[in-house]
Image (tube, grey):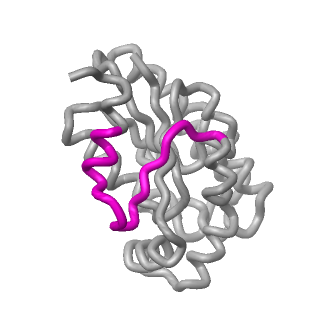
Amino acid sequence: MLRIGITGGIGSGKSVVSKIFESLGFTVFNSDLEAQKIINNDVEVRRELITVFGMEIYTEKGLNRELLAQQIFSDNSLREAVNKIVHPRVREAFDLLCLSDSNSLIFNEAAILIETGTYKEFDKILLITANLECRIQRVMNRDLISREQVESRIDNQWSDDKKRDFSDSEIKNDDSQSLLIQVENFIDQFISV
């Protein structure tokens, strides 16, 4: 089994590419969704986050995502604190999935695989990219936030150029090329038909 990390900046379209892999029968582990489950359901994680951020980090509905985003995108030390609390548990969940999955390729979608050094745990890293304006518009529409908020989040992430140095392949998700063809070409590197 090859463990393949799918990464890219906010709004690049990682989830769209992941859905294509899933539609072709491959397992895709979504680190962000797993982190959300852990943050809302793991009692120890909740306790640790409350210690860092205070009781207001949770509401009766679960994590106060807006407050967390405001905090971690304006303070690198808080972002690192959250990563240290949540990421090891997400990695454990992915490792358990790998033990039970029979696919020859298993994918893990995560925005900050490279930045955290987690990319070293994968056989291949697939970078998803899109032009900046396309990314900004996608996130504004998806999250209903301002251009300035999106730009602030992008500014807190590594650039595509920096991520390319750690990536084995790249898929461009900006309508300049067919996504399906790019995904099939990627898969063809590892699976003979």
The residue depicted at 64 percent of the width and 40 percent of the height is: 166
190 or 97, which lies in front? 190
31 or 177, which lies in front? 177
Numbered range of the magenta stretch = 166-185
The residue depicted at 67 percent of the width and 49 percent of the height is: 82
**Residue 168: quarter of image:** top right
* Residue 106 drawn at (x, y percent): 37, 27
Q: Is residue 168 left or right of residue 114?
A: left
* Residue 121 drawn at (x, y percent): 59, 25
The residue depicted at 73 percent of the width and 49 percent of the height is: 80
Q: Residue furthest right?
A: 77
67 or 19, which lies in front? 19
**Residue 2: quarter of image:** top left
41 shown above or below 95: below
107 shown above or below 9: above
33 within the magenta span: no
Does the image show residue 86? no
Question: Which image quarter holds the C terminus?
Answer: top left
The residue depicted at 34 percent of the width and 50 percent of the height is: 17
Q: Is residue 29 left or right of residue 50?
A: left
Question: Which image quarter holds the N terminus?
Answer: top left
* Residue 125 drawn at (x, y percent): 53, 36
131 shown above or below 21: below
Does the image show residue 26? yes
182 within the magenta span: yes
67 or 10, which lies in front? 10
